[in-house]
Image (spheres, rainbow, N blue to C red):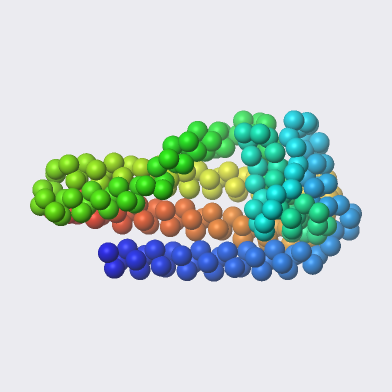
Amino acid sequence: MMTYYILIGGIALISWMVSNKLKSKFKKYSKVHLRNGMSGAEIAQKMLDDHGIRDVKVISTPGMLTDHYNPKNKTVNLSEGVYNQRNASAAAVAAHECGHAVQHAQAYEWLTMRSKLVPVVSVTSGMSTWVVFGGIMLMAATGVAGGIGFYIAVAGLIMMGFATLFSFITLPVEYDASKRALVWLKQKNMVSQEEYSGAEDALKWAARTYLVAALGALASLLYWALQIFGGRD
């Protein structure tokens, strides 16, 4: 278990470092004011309009970096630091979230795949580690490598696998949304070169948070797989 705690600790440390870097980048580019004077909400609405999307609402949501697109009620939810602000960070985040709305409208395959996994992951992700751990403990207690404990552990590993798969499917979804955002910002001349560079850098660090999460999920999955199948030797 010590190896597991070291693994989780290392992943948590890297995640914290990337998250802090993202926050510092967001703060830095929040000082780069847009020459067009548009707020994040206005940027979002224009991007939706330019893509012919009329059934998605842009709304404000509490918190910092809580921005997201909700495909269920078709809303672009912008945090307080984005909705009313008029800077490069706000433009980047607003356009990125609208990128998800465009993906939804165009039935982007990776977003569709991720949406199908949401119900499964929402149920299994919270209990998977406990199921795996319980199965391994039962294997150790009974001394039977191929007994019920093994199958319980494997069931937990499958649950964990769905969460890992979800994390990796999220990567192309997020990277594509950022690409769509940056292309639109540039093609529509929404930002100056300085503003564009800031938006690009901010979105790059946002994407890295998802990359760290995916690699962390994979590392955890492989660790528990070794514990389960290694325990049979």
Closest to the observer: 109 or 82? 82
Residue 143, compared with residue 99, is above or below; it is below
- Residue, far left: 143
Where is residue 169 shown, x and y percent of the image?
50, 43
Residue 5 visible (yes or no) = yes
Where is residue 93 shown, x and y percent of the image?
71, 52
Where is residue 52 shown, x and y percent of the image?
78, 31
- Would residue 11 be found to the left or right of residue 32 on screen? left
Closest to the observer: 156 or 138? 138
- Residue at the image position 39 percent from the left and 53 percent from the top: 218
Residue 232 visible (yes or no) = no
- Residue at the image position 77 percent from the left and 45 percent from the top: 44
- Would residue 33 be found to the left or right of residue 136 on screen? right
- Would residue 180 be found to the left or right of residue 152 on screen? right
**Label tally:** 0
- Residue at the image position 65 percent from the left and 42 percent from the top: 69
Quadrant in the picture for residue 163: top left
Image quarter of the N terminus: bottom left
Closest to the observer: 178 or 187? 178
- Residue at the image position 11 percent from the left and 50 percent from the top: 142
Residue 225, compared with residue 25, is above or below; it is above
- Residue, far front: 62
Where is residue 181 shown, x and y percent of the image?
71, 47
Residue 102, compared with residue 220, is above or below; it is above
